[in-house]
Every structure is written in C-alpha cells, then in structure tokens.
Amino acid sequence: MRDRWTDFTLRAPGSRFAGHALLAFVIWILLARLNMIIDAQMSYYLALAAMYATAMFGMTILVGLSGQVSLGNGALMAVGGYVFALTSMHWKTVPILGLPWNAVWSMVFAGLGGIIIGLIIGALGARLRGPYLAGLTLGVAVGIPSIINRYPSLLGGEQGLKLIVPYPEGGYPEQVLSEDAQFDDSALDEFLVDESAVVQAPLEEAAPAEGDLLTLEDAQQGVAQEDLLTLEDAQQGVAQEDLLTLEDAQQGVQDMPTDAPISEATPELATDPSDAFTTASDFVLQQWQASVAIAVACIVGFLALNLVRGRQGRVWQAVRDDPVAAAVIGISPSGGKISAFVVSSMFAALSGAVFAQILTLAAPSAFGLGLSLSLLVGVVLGGRLSLIGAVIGALLIVWLPEWVDSLSAELGMPRQVADNAPNLLYGLLVVAVVLVAPRGIMGGVSGLMSKMRRSSAPPSSG
Amino acid sequence: MKSFAIRTVAVSTIVGLMAVGTAGAANAADPGVTKTQITIGTTTPLTGPASPGYKDVSAGANAYFAYVNKSGGINGRSVNLVIKDDQYNPTTTITKTNELILNDKVFAIYGALGTANHLAVVDEINKQGIPDVFVNTGSNAFDNVQKYPYTFPYFPSYAVEAKVMAKYIQDTPDLASKKRCFFYQEGEFGENAGQGFASAGFTTWTAQASYLPTQIAQGFGAQVTRLKASGCELVVFFGVTSATGVLLRTAAALQFRPQWMVTSVGSEPTVLAGIVGSVPATRAAMTGMYTPSFLVPITDVGNPYVSQMKTVVEAAGLPWNFYTYYGANTAYVLSQALKAAGPNLTRKGLVKALQDNAKNFRSAAVVPFVITKSSHQGLTGYYMGQYDSAGAVVRLGKPNEIYVAGNAGGSLAKVATFKPAPPTKKLLP
Amino acid sequence: MGSFLDYFLGGIANGAVIALMALALVLVWRSTRVVNFAQVGQAMFTSFIALTAVNITGSWLIGLIVGIIAGGILGFIVHVLVMRPVRRADASGAIIATFGVLIALQSLAAMIWTAEPRAYPTPIEYAGLTIFGRVVPLTGYDVFVFIVMIVLVLFLTILLTKTKLGLSMRASAFNPEVARLSGVRVSRMLAIGWIIAGMVGAVAGVLIAPISSLSPNTFDIFLVFAFTAAVIGGLDSLVGAVAFGIGTGLILSLVTGYSDASNAPIVALILLALNLWFKPDGAFSHHKARSV
C-alpha cells in the first residue's frame, strides 16, 4: 500500500502538480454536475459527504500517514465553524487589509484558526505515544465544547451562533421576517375570567356523562364515527363546529368565549413559500450547500494530494515507521508529527466552516465527541492510508446510519427494540468491518487487487 | 493518469449509486395531504442519554392518532405521524428534518423536541412555510410571530414558570421570609429561568449554584455543600428530572432539608420515583416539594381528560406517565386544529385554524392557550402543586386558581381563575 | 475552612469511583495493550444483570457476585469474538472496534432494560458521616467504596507482580513472541486479562450505580474521566490510576465548589495538558519517554 505513494515521486514535480490540478478540477465539474441533477435530499447528503471528506483528508494524513491517533478532530472542526460564524457575523471589512468582507475571507480565517490550534495540540502531542495522545485528544474533544459553553455571551452557549446564509437565487421568494423577538401579551387578558363570575364547582362535576367517555374497547377498536354523527345529526342537525358550544350548554358551563369565524382573512401570510419550494427544478438551499462543500473538498483534496504524494508525504511516513532512522537522515520527528497535526487541523477547521454553513449554525452539540469518533470511524473503515479511503469513509459516515435506519424500519419490531436496533446494527457493523478489513475497505480492496494481479501475472521463468 | 481515471469513475459511481438508492417519492401537489391521509413528522430523542422519558412523548401522541384513525380519522383522513430519532443532537435534527420535508413530504412538523435542536431548523421550516406546531420545549424563543409565523409553541415557557414561582413565593408569607437560593442547569434552561426571575425582581439570591448535564452521574456533593453552607432555606431548582433525583438524594445524605421548589420539567413523578427508589430519607425529601404544573394532575384519575387519555395510552401498550399523557394531549389539540382547518386542508388553513380557534380547543391543560395573529405564546401559566407523602402532586390554591404571565420581560405573573371546558365526546376532535 | 474539608471529602468520594473504572482500563492495557472504550459499556451491562439478581433475591451481595461472574464472562466474550480477531488491526482499528462494542452493548441494554434510569440499592445507608459534630459530604457508602478500591488495588498488585500468572500475563502483553518461546500460553493469558478486567469493571459498575443511578448511558462520563486518570497516571500503573482517579474527583469537586460547575471541564483539560507536557508517559510510568 505504501509503495503506491512512492510510485509517483519519479514524476517531475511540475507535471505532477498539473495532473493533480486537472484531477481535482474534473472531479469538481463532475460533482457539480451531479449536484444539479439529483434531488434536494441527495444534495444534502452530498454536501455532508463532501464536508466529511474534507476533514477526512486531514485524518488520512494524521492517523494514516503520520500514525497519530486523534479522538479530537471534531473539536478542531468547531474552531473553524466558530471562526467562520464570528467573522461573518461581526466583520463588515477584513481587519488590517481593509477589504470588504465576503465568505471566502471567513473561510481563510477559519483555516488560520485551525493552523494555530493545530500547532498548539501538535506541539503537545508530538511528545506522546499512542494511547497518551488518544487521552490528550479525548480531552480536547470534551474540553473545547465545554469552553464554548463557558462563554455564552461571545459564543452563544448551548444554542450556538446562528449563521445568516446567503440564499440561492430562485430558491425561495423573499419573505419579510423580522429579526426581533416580539412578545405580545395583550391577547392574554381576554382569557382571564373574573374570579367572581366563575361557578365555584370542582372540575369533576363538569365531567361529561358516562356514555361520552371512551372505553378501553373504544381505544382498541375505535369508535364508529358514523354512529356518533347520525346520533348528533338526529338530535340537532347542526354542523360539527357547533358541537363544542352545544356540549358546553348541556353541561351548564359557559367557560370560554366562542367566536371568531374561520372565514376571516389572514393578511400576515401573503405568499405560501411551499408552492415555490415543491417545484423540483429550482436551485434549492441544499444544492447551494453542496456546491460550497464540493468546492472546498476539491481544493482541500488537491492540497492533500500534493502533500501526500510529495516530499512531505514521505517525511510523515518516515517519522511514523522509524523516527530514529528519520532523525539520522535529517528529518525532525517532532517537526513531522507537528506538521501533520497542523495540516489535519487546518483541513478540519475548513470542514467545520463548511459544516457551520450546512447547519446554518455553529453550536457545541454539533461538534461533540460523537463527531470526533465518527471521523475516526470513517477513516479507519474507509482505509487510513489513502485519500480514496478518506472519501469512502466520508460516504460511510453519511450513508451507514441512514441505511441501518431504513433497514431496521422494515422489520416491524416492538418499539423498545425497534428504536435501538439501528444503533445496535451500527455498532456491530463497525466491529465487523474492522474484523473483516483491518486496514479499512480501501486497504482490503487494494490487498485483493494486488493478490489478483499476482495470480494473473504470467510465470516469470521461461 | 490511468489510475486517476479509475478512481474518479469509482467515486462518481458510488455517489451515483447512493443517489439511485434513496431518491424517489412522488411529487404531491399539496405536500403531505391526500384524500385519505395527513402525514406529519416529528424529531425527538428515541435513543441516547436524553431518551429516558422524552421517547414516550411521540409514542403517546401516536397512540392518540391511532385511536382517531380507528374512529374514522379527521375529516375522513387518517393521521400518519413519522417519528425520527435525532438522539438530541442538533446536527442529526437537521438531517432528520430534511428527510421529513424532502423524503416523507410531511404536511407539518409536530412536537419537535429540544431547544437547541429546533433552533437549528426553525428558520428553514418557516422559510418554507411549513406549519411547525407544538414545539416541545419551554424556551420562549419560538414565541415570535414576526420571525416564526408558522411556529406554534404549546409548553408554557420556563420564563413564565420562573415568574409564577416568584409570585407564589411573594404571596406566601412562609416562603417569602425564607433565605432563597437558586440551583440551575447550565445553558439556556437555567438562563431563561434566571431572566424570568429577574423580571419578577428576584435578582439577588442567598446563594447560587449550577451543574452541567454531564455532572448528573457524579452527584451534586459540591453544589449541595455550597447551598447548605450558605444557609439556604428555600431552594429553587431548574434542572431535568434525573438531576432532581440526584439532588434530593445528595441533600438527604448531607441532612440538608430546605424547602424545595422544582420546575415542572424536573419533577416527573414516575421517573423521579424510579431514581429515588425506596430510600426513606430521599422519599421524605420529596414530600412537600413544590412544583408548578399546567395539566390536570396525572394522579387525578376521576378527571375525564386523565381517565380517557390513560385509556388511549394503555390501549396502545404504553406506560402511563407524564410524557405519554403530554404527548396524547397535544395530539388531541392538533387533531382539533386539523378538524377546524376543514376538509380542504392546506398549510395556510391550519395556521389560520390555530390562530382563530385556539381558544376553543379542549385539552387537559388548566391554563389559557393563547394563539392569535399577534401572539404565539401557547400555554400561558401554571398552577402550583406540591408532592404529598404518597409521591403524587396535589394542586394547591382555590379551585381553578392559576398563575399566568406573558413571555415579555415586563409582564409579571398574575393570579387568575380559569375553568377549562370538558373534553369532547369520546375524546374525538 | 469547613467548606474546604467538605469539598475535599466530597471530591475523594467522587474520585474513588473514577479510580475504580480507571483500574479496569489499566488492567486491559497491561494485559493486551488495548485501550478498552467498551469498558464502561461492559460495566453498565453487568450492573443491569446484577440489579436483576438483586431484584430477584433481595440481596446486594448476591447481586455483586452475579455481576462479577457476568463481568468475567462478558470480558471473555468480547475478547474471543472481537479483540482476538482484531489483533491484526493497528491501534486506531482496535479503538474503533471497542467503540463499536460500546455502542452495541448500550443499544442492547436499552432494548432489554429500557433507557429509564433506575435506583440501585446500597449495602450501607447512603447518609453523610458526622465528623466533629457536623455532617460532611462523605457517606458511609463512600467509605465502603474506598475500602473496596484499596483492597482491589492491593489484591491486583500482588496478583500481577508476585504470582506466576501475573508475570506470564505481563510477558504475553509486552512481548508475545518471547513469552511464547518460554512456554507461556499467550492466548490464554490475554483471555485471562480480559476476564479479570471485566470482573473489576463489574465491581466498579455495581459500586457506581447507586451514585449515578443505572441507565445505558449514565456511565459514559466516567469513561472520559477514567481514561484521563489512567493516562495521567501512566497506563501501566494501578497505583497511578487510583491516585489520579481520586485527584480528578478532587479537582472537579473543588472547582465546582469554589468557582463554577462550568469551569470544571476546562480546568481538567488544562491540567491534563500540563501533566502530559511534563510527563508524556504518565506520572507513574516505569519507562522513560522516548527521546525522539
């Protein structure tokens, strides 16, 4: 597997660079085209997959190439998400440069934030062996959301920061929505019955007659509505809406004013946006989200390709495989480890910035330990040594839970079992994949391919 | 370059296969409504740490809809409630809400649970003009007609509850004279309550303490020590029920016996009894605890709402507790709204039916239900209850006496009398 | 000053249960070189089995014994079905596998026993002790937990360092090839390591359950704290796990008591980072950190 990467080092750097650029461009065109032909729900999945792939490229470098286990990359994504949210909320112009702000600047600063946090954690982590690094990054995964919760005035606390996302053209018709909370309590007063006017009777006395109560049999079999209707029709011959007042009268309690005819117009709701939404051909929010996520994933993928297949990729592997030997040939082991952390943290932060745009929200709960663990699950299951493995991992994270959900939905089990069946299946599947393909799906595939190649090759001696 | 091409093809094939796998579902002209069916959807935690109790709310609602469906449905249509598990994670809530809207093509979102969870999707739901009825949270953030014209809370807000508590304390000489302390869950839950108390003039406390949800499992030794050392005589607690159980147990162990007043969200009797167990000291701490509530007490089985909803819930094989009760109750209210919206059911029609007819809807709530063109407050108040030695909540005060308040900062709690109407025949809409 | 004593004693009570869970993590690491994220899941699952036994027999002790047996069996099952086959994978693969086991156990427990938290009885009354005429946040039960923990550490230390079994287990974990050549049945030793860790985890679970109450997820937070304590203590050291387990409990209690609950995780993170900066292999580790 590792030889794969070194194959490419024989090429001239320039042509390799151009090849990677072309590859990234072609994939971008293909995915952008795909985004236009699939429905909104699929676009949403595509956006998520591209966002996860962005973070997963960093995981491939960190966990796969440089051999450092991280349980905390989800929290690094939070850094990017929050930098994006804060800068896009508060900046009209870019500080120092004085240029007008736009979303690309927020992405750049999110990436910078990732680099800084990556340096800090990388410097701490470079001295640590496997499980100790896992312990540190677990602390980061749990600690960063706590820090966010600690400063609610700046970071929005539990509810997070709400992003204003530029809506795509032709998406929804503009609806005039005020941003301010407005409580109108005047309506409350009309409900408050004057104490003296109320018949001071215990509630039980106002209970309906025995025959009006539903029985267990009713609840199990249902009540034949025709019977009820005929009975009432026979008695009163009135429309259903009138029944409420009628019964009130029968009970001798006039508790609530009953007026407000239904036919009155509702001026507030001038347009029904759902009409526009259901026409499938429009460029909807999900497609816009996917196009952002795809663009970032392709740029990050291009960077990752160059790093992984260039000198830096070999440095990381050398440090992972034998730090002492690496030091002998002049490679700084801690430098290699820290640089892997910085790159992966930058990718995570960019991915987090995209995630915040997909969620239209940066909230601590979105970047919890669960996210960090899914990133590790993705990179381990996909195959931690190749960028394709990263993409497969990203697809797995998005698709596996959905598939497991739909699978268990069809089984028709009792509620307590059915509710938990998807998680059980998910856990078992994770274990199964690690057992069947310890180097991930991509590792398994390339292992199979090389086996086939060997068996199909002609005998070398003649 | 060949390997590049292969990989590219492989990637796009996988993505393409995924597309084929999950795409589909017909485009209905009127989303979620056919001649025979209304499809609505909810997001709620069915699994994970937040699932205890909460998972029963949607099940209780489904039990009521099943009963209505068997009895001929609403205006000839049966109600199909699609329940999605979001594990109380806002990210998952977004995914699941997208699925409800785009795949299941729901007519309305109903009973979505969790403040942070629902805040993540509420803008989008409103932009698309999808009715968003009876959000299951006490945050007052969703009472906002201008910003969220399609969103309708039901649960009376934490801020109102805090105002009610403050009013009750002020009006009860025995409580007003006590040194009062505030213990709350970190985050918007405690924050909303704090704002409610502040607007009622409760800005200073003898002592304050807080906890993080993750600390529940470790016990509240440090917090209780602080409250006890400060000489607190009345402790107001805003936290979830599992935290209340831990708090009472820790306090009992430390022989700290103040007067407790606990939020309605933190005092579900059956769950509390399960956590407290049979330890006599903790059981004793529970007795006399004040807790506001807004539904007819669940133990009042002679009440026609309680008895009938209990029948509906138990007929579906579900446990009878506050969560199933609350779920069945909001389903009952929604069914009346759907019926009032008439046979030509549209989203705008449902919104209008809610705004015009909310005051005529029957329910087990014993406080006014306010939805108008200018206010989406939902339930507007509480009555004060108190635990008796048998572990049941007893309603205090004169018959039909309640406390109401608005969500606005300046609105204070008022004592009022409110007599709710009896249920409709056979509890059908 | 009085409240300092209270926060201190309360912290020790909190720390003892963290230490117990950390012990189980260290045992698995020592015997198989795997960080077992499923440990809290196994402890939770066996505690449910123990609670079932308590409900049937009415005896706390029988519950404990049933729990310990179940813990050993579950440890063995996890080892045979998952961890032994997974040895071909690297560290991240093994972590993910134990993570998968954790999710599976939690869902299974929710299927069988529902997600609602339950009270777990205590053998000794859960009431604060009176010291110098005042009630402190240290209950008789906490003292009981503390004593059990000390006894367990002593017992395990003797077992692992003074007996032939213990030495064979260490040899199998550190260098399976050499151990095999010197006649140790390595695979059996690894299995025994998982069984013992499962039993210790079961004890931890049964002792934690009355404090946290029992549900499929209530032990989750102890995984984070126990792992942190084990890492700071040096994953090989039983004493380190106990010392830093109690230390973690103390810090959480003092920070919560003197400042604010929301500061506790942040202080814990900073101390974790500082500890690892100065002691990259843990405070009680027998090895020197690699200098590269």
Image (spheres, grey):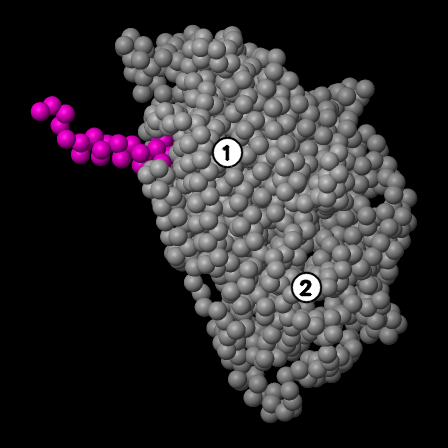
Left or right: residue B195 versus residue C24 is: right
Q: Which mark is residue A303?
A: 1
Give C27 or A291, whichever is nearer the viewer.
A291
State which region is magenta.
Answer: A436-462
The crowd level at tag 1 (other Cα within 10 Å; few <14, some 14-19, many 20+) is: some
How far apart marks 1 and 2 lie (CA) works out to 38 Å
Q: Is A204 left, or right, of A462 in this rendering?
A: right
- Image quadrant assignment for residue A16: top left
Residue at mark 2: A174
Residue B349: x %, y % from top left:
65, 75
Residue A345 sits above or below residue A419 on the image = above
Q: At 61% across and 41% down in the image, what residue appears?
A: A353
Against C58, residue B173 (above or below) is below
Viewer-proximal residue among B7 and B215: B7
Mark in the foreground, 1 or 2: 1
Same chain for the residues under marks 1 and 2 in the image: yes
- Front position in the image: A26 or B395: A26
Left or right position of A266 against B233: left
Q: Chain of mark 2?
A: A
Q: Main structural element of the magenta stretch: helix, strand or loop?
A: helix
Up-down relation of residue C66 to residue B243 (above or below): above
Q: Position of residue A375 (x, y in %)?
A: 49, 36
Question: Residue farthest to the left?
Answer: A462
Residue B392 spot, x, y in % from top left: 68, 53
C100 is within the stretch colored magenta: no
Q: For residue C239, what is the image quadrant?
A: top right
Other-residue count near label 2 (Cα within 10 Å), few / some / many at <14 / 14–19 / ≥20: few
Q: Residue at x 37, y 39 (%)?
A: B4
Q: Secondary structure at mark 1?
A: helix
> Element at badge 2?
loop
